Amino acid sequence: MTLTSSTLSPIHGAIVVGASSGIGEAMARRLAREGYSVALVARRVDRLNAICDEINAQLGTKRAFAYPHDVTHFDEVPTLFQTVLRDLERIKIVVYSSGVMPTMALNEYNFEKDRLMIDVNVLGAIAWLNQAAILFDRLGSGHIVGISSVSGVRGRVVNPGYGMTKAALTTYLESLRNRLTRKGVHVLTVKPGFVDTDMFRATGRAASMAISSDQAAGDIWKAIRARKQILYTPARWAWIMLVIRYIPSFIFRRLSI
Amino acid sequence: MDYVSHPLHPLFYFQKTFYLVIRERNCSLIIVSLFIVFMPTSDRLTLLQNFGRSIKSAAYIYRPSHTEHVAEIFSLAAEREFKIGLRGSGRSYGDASLNAGGIILDLRRMNRIIEWGPESGVIKVEPGVTIQQIWQYTLEDGWWLPVVPGTMFPTIGGCLAMNIHGKNNYVAGPIGEHVLEFEALLPTDELITCSPQRNADLFYAMIGGAGVLGVFTSITMQMKKIYSGNVWVDAWSAPTLRAMMDDFEPIKGESDYLVGWVDGTHSRGRGQIHRATYLHGDEDHEPTQTLSVEFQTLPDTFLGVMPKSLLWRFMRPFMNDLGTTLVNTAKYYHARLFEHRKRYVQSLVAFNFLLDYVPNWEKSYGSGGLIQYQSFIPREQAHDAFVEMLRLCQKRGLPTYLGVLKRHRPDQFLLTHAVDGYSLAMDFPAKQGNRIDLQKLADDMNEIVLSAGGRFYFAKDSTLNANVVKRYLGEDTMDRFRKLKARCDPDGLLETELYRRLLS
């Protein structure tokens, strides 16, 4: 795909937070391929630089830019957001993909792990997406993409903290959507099922159950273009969650999912 | 160098020392508190657009009201490595006053009239003063701006940065030729005074310099003496562009203003000529009446009934290829049948500020906005090149909705757009679906203009590229400009989207 920048059709920018692995990395690669200048934000500097170099080498032009940042350093976010906006000039898409899910035994209650999940999965998302909301509110356009999870739909016996953070993120994104749709901004809540990422592998499930993160990124890109509100990827999880959502509590509390 | 440095406000130097502390990273507490205070906060983040409403750009906006404030923002921007773009009323058609992701200095609050000499006609103003403010201030003393654009809303700072011209460019030159002196604050914190005699190199470069060399802080200009608030207007139609140009040449010596409307949907460019001359001596029997602001004020209703603020909405349904063809044809035959060889008096404001006749007319182009493509071509080559361009537009299915022909003469400003010849300004709707084709059309028209020895105008442009600019300005001019840029703004603080696109 050849791309020329002109005033009438400028190259737009995208920010992907949590771009050093998983769905974030795949999204960064996809957006760069689709012609965006992409700011990759993540903590692991080496990994980040390697991905940027790879994308730029593949495309033969500088499209990926690395911004090392730990999402739990909330105070740095406004300044870093400004720096990215300054460098890319125009930002059209902000994807928040950072997320952690420490392994948690069924009888484990661990405040430190829960707090880490709240910091990364919720507060980091709010810090970044608030900035995106301000910008897009002013612009009257833009796409906010939050990677939530099917885990946020019900409180399950496995990892209470994780499900809680994803429920919080889903509700936060819904609020953003209700605030910003009237301003012309599109907010997409992504609820991945089994996607073959580091997080998925840590659960010990068979890789054959999952789709690749590139496939997930493809679904997300299509959903952005179609201005879809909620995306289950893979799509069959919409049906699975429809069932799970309506399992009555007296049954659900006896299940081990 | 003949730079004169004026002392700035003492608080400014106090603040400078704090920035030094930051730079040296000696005192971390102060660093933190200053960052909080001086970081461009998100409430400054503002959506800005070009006048054509075809480009969207978000920037952190600052509205200084004194030179000291400008100097403060220079320091702030340098510290955070932000670029600063200057902006007045934002009436440039393209990206000349946009700076996405950076800082925009909106200079409209520096809008004081500093000195006025009703005997000499010399006026000294701050850069945010508008054309409207000036004529309303001086008219009753019998003075008019020697050069005005087609609208009264631009600021004088913006007019100088773009070195605007009017329908009298072939006789009066650009506005810069009527500037006696200006003061400017450079990003190096020097306050300099420039005139054709003093710092002449900067005088001829900053006027027309697209606002990237420094900030005008005061402008002293010679106004034109007039004896009436009216002008004689002659109107007649021309069946082709050739006929229009043939009509222009013999009468330009005895006309104060000349302008041609060109029907861009017609293959040979038919249209209508308007020519105006000032009233002299006692031709106006009631000059005190015509020289009053009330007399000059444009009516706010159309045909006496419809509020003009609504008019653009009624134009909206005609802003398509078919509608424009119909309107243009009707306009041409109206001119041919009812206004041919007609002579009448019109107020200076009504004649000059035609673009203000319908408020917000640019909105009638819809959400995609519009662009203007204006090229300046030497007299001998102008006709053939313009006709070739008009036909190319029609062939591509991108007819121009409004064409305006003007006569020009060269001037000595560094980045001048003027030639001894003609300019044709063409408005195009920019829609979601035609932007790539429109850019391609502009690229192809650039080649026609360049091979005819033509030039371009930054106030109108949104489609040129750096290579085209280098070709028409020449390597020498570009070098001289770059050297001045390095001298005035060694850290490259002043930038706009137009500068990054064309001049950097």
Image (tube, coloured by chain):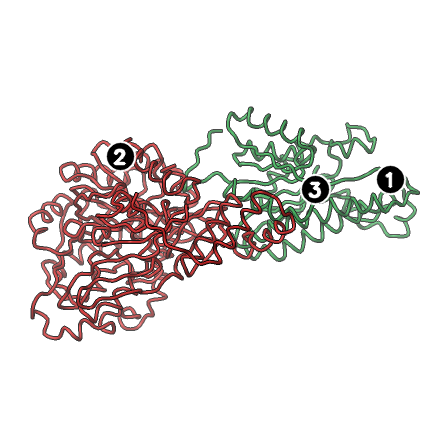
Disc 1 and disc 2 on one polypeptide chain = no
Nearer the observer, A81 or B316: A81
- Mark 1 vs 3: CB contact within 8 A: no
**Residue A232, numbered circle:** 3
**Residue B472, numbered circle:** 2
Mark 2 residue type:
Tyr
Horizontal placement of B324 versus B289: left or right?
right
Residue A177, x across and y down, in percent: 63, 53
Residue B278 position by quadrant:
bottom left
Horizontal placement of B464 versus B73: left or right?
left
Q: Which residue is mark 1?
A: A104
Residue sitting at x 43%, y 40%: B492
Rendered shade, chain A: green
Mark 1 residue type:
Met
Mark 1 closeness class: few <14, some 14–19, many ≥20 residues within 10 Å: some
Horizontal placement of B10 versus B203: left or right?
right
- Mark 2 vs 3: CB contact within 8 A: no
Mark 3 residue type:
Tyr
- Location of the C terminus of chain B by quadrant is top left
Nearer the observer, B154 or B15: B15
Residue B329, x across and y down, in percent: 22, 52
Residue B449, x across and y down, in percent: 24, 36
Disc 2 and disc 3 on one polypeptide chain = no
How many angstroms separate mark 1 from mark 2 (CA)? 69 Å
Q: Which chain is red?
A: B
At mark 2, the secondary structure is: helix
Which is more foreground, mark 2 or mark 3? 2
